[in-house]
Amino acid sequence: MKTVAVVTCIIFQLLLVSFCISQDETKSCRNHPMVTGECFLFWGRMQLYEESPRVRIWRVGTTRVLGVMDDEYQLEGYENVPSDLIGRIDWNTAMFGDFTVCPFADDIPHRMRPICVEKAENTVIKKRRDAPQNANRLVDYAPAVVTLTGTLTKEKIPGSSDDDSAETQEVGIFLTLEEPIDIRHGDAVNVAETGIERLQLVLFAEHLERLEAFLRRKVIATGTLFHAHSEDQPARVTLIVEKLVDPEPRLVTNDIMTEP
């Protein structure tokens, strides 16, 4: 059987080949060489904005808003905000929590202070006041990072071989979402979509090694979204997975997964 990683990369051709290699470890905000002072902790609300900086945190109880920098402060190998953290909010939600942040500049009155985010604890996701009623979660295509929950399945892809026999059909990995999502327009290829309930996944080697333990279970997947390039792809949208987590981990005994 062909590996899932190879199958999916063929579908996406050269555009996504670079995503099929292992990712380097990124350093956290605290280690960023442009940090100018001590990191500090406060209760705040993080949400997305149209203009830069795209991610901002309001210090609850004050008029101060801090900007999570994504321009000249974005250095290769460093993470200005944890991807699995920012992936939990969208254009209809905000995150409240205890944020540990590190400054890129002194605090100047009436100016947005540039920061990066080390971590957030005791987090709560709430609907934004300006969000439409009964709206699906509204997310963006890559390079934005999203975190989604659903059930993982492995399925044969119809029409993936000339003779279409069960033995020669290619296999894909899919995530059936717990709740449908809407995706904002990105470009000519990554067009707006509404009511997406099922995604095809691109997995890295480390995920494939543990794949059987995740199948037919609820998982939390963090990664970036891309629209299908042709109508014959098995799902309209694909998620390139950076992190795959079982929210209900099982015990491992002699390499056999068992219920706790």
Image (cartoon, helix red, strand yellow):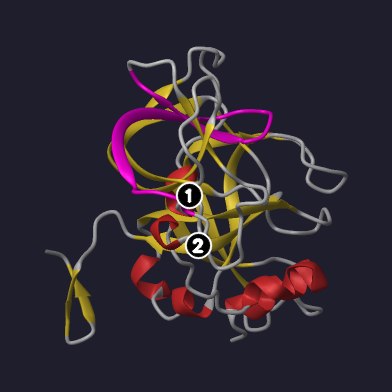
First-in-chain label (2 vs 1): 2
Residue at point 50% right, 46% down? Answer: 104
Q: Nearer the viewer, residue 187 or 34?
A: 34
Q: Provide the residue designation for mark 2.
A: 33
Residue 184 in the figure: left or right of residue 251? right
In the rendered image, the vertical position of residue 169 relative to residue 114, given as above or below: below
Residue at the extreme left: 260
Residue at point 57% right, 49% down? Answer: 145
In which image quadrant can residue 209 be found? bottom left
Q: Amino acid at mark 1?
A: Val
Looking at the rendered image, the disc whose residue lies closer to the viewer, 2 or 1, is 2
Residue 234: where, in percent of width, then height? 70, 58
In this rendering, the count of numbered labels is 2
Magenta part of the chain: 35-60
Disc 1 secondary structure class: loop
Residue 142: where, in percent of width, then height? 67, 51
Residue 180: where, in percent of width, then height? 54, 35
What is the CA distance from the residue labelled 2 to the residue labelled 1?
A: 15 Å
Residue 84 in the figure: left or right of residue 75? left
Disc 2 secondary structure class: loop
Mark number displayed over residue 68: none
Work out whether residue 169 can be spotted: no
Residue 215 in the figure: left or right of residue 78? left
Work out whether residue 76 can be spotted: yes
Q: Nearer the viewer, residue 188 or 229?
A: 188
In the rendered image, the vertical position of residue 80 relative to residue 56, given as above or below: below
Q: Provide the residue designation for mark 1.
A: 81
In the rendered image, the vertical position of residue 35 relative to residue 249, given as above or below: above
Q: Quadrant of the C terminus?
A: bottom left
Q: Quadrant of the N terminus?
A: bottom right
